[in-house]
Amino acid sequence: MTGLSTHVLDAVTGRPARGVRVTLLDATGSELASGTTDSDGRIAELAGSVLAAGRYQLVFDTGTWFSDNAIEGFYPEVIISFVADGTAGRLHIPLLLSPYAYSTYRGS
């Protein structure tokens, strides 16, 4: 079993992206969990300890966040597909976001 957390950083300002809606989907596209980033741009426990081995997607509602912050953005959503092997104690998947680019990595 694996837990999952995420955070979003506004790469233009270097500040946390508060209020980004994030949805966790399984391989069939079924919603497993969702949440909204806090004032530090984080969701500490998106999946708790129920993430078994398999393929998943994190869907970040960036379009709404851009709109709410009066930013003209190119990406209405960012989808990060990943594989959990079921052996790691925690997965942390950050998103660094700007209006015309984004990047991600496997955090710790």
Image (cartoon, rainbow, N blue to C red):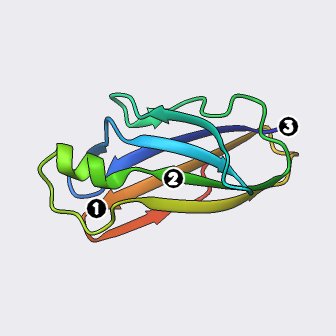
* Residue that badge 2 annotates: 59
| Nearer-the-camera pick, 72 or 102 | 72
Q: Name the quadrant containing residue 54.
A: bottom right
Where disc 2 sits, the SS reads strand
Amino acid found under the numbered disc labelled 3: Met
Placement of the N terminus among the 4 image quadrants: top right
Where disc 1 sits, the SS reads strand
Distance of label 1 from label 2 (alpha carbons):
16 Å
Distance of label 2 from label 3 (alpha carbons):
21 Å
Amino acid found under the numbered disc labelled 2: Val
Distance of label 3 from label 1 (alpha carbons):
33 Å
First in sequence: mark 1 vs mark 2: 2
* Residue that badge 1 annotates: 98
Number of the front mark, 1 or 2 = 2
Q: Position of residue 48 (x, y in %)?
A: 70, 28
First in sequence: mark 3 vs mark 1: 3
Instruction: Tell me, yes or no, whether the two marked residues, 3 and 1, touch with CB atoms within 8 Å.
Output: no
Q: Residue at 63% of width from left, 62% of height from top?
A: 81
Residue 1: which disc?
A: 3
Q: Position of residue 89 (x, y in %)?
A: 79, 37
First in sequence: mark 2 vs mark 3: 3
Number of the front mark, 2 or 3 = 2
Please say whether residue 77 is visible from this viewpoint.
yes
Q: Residue at 40% of width from left, 59% of height from top?
A: 77
Q: Residue at 22% of width from left, 58% of height from top?
A: 12
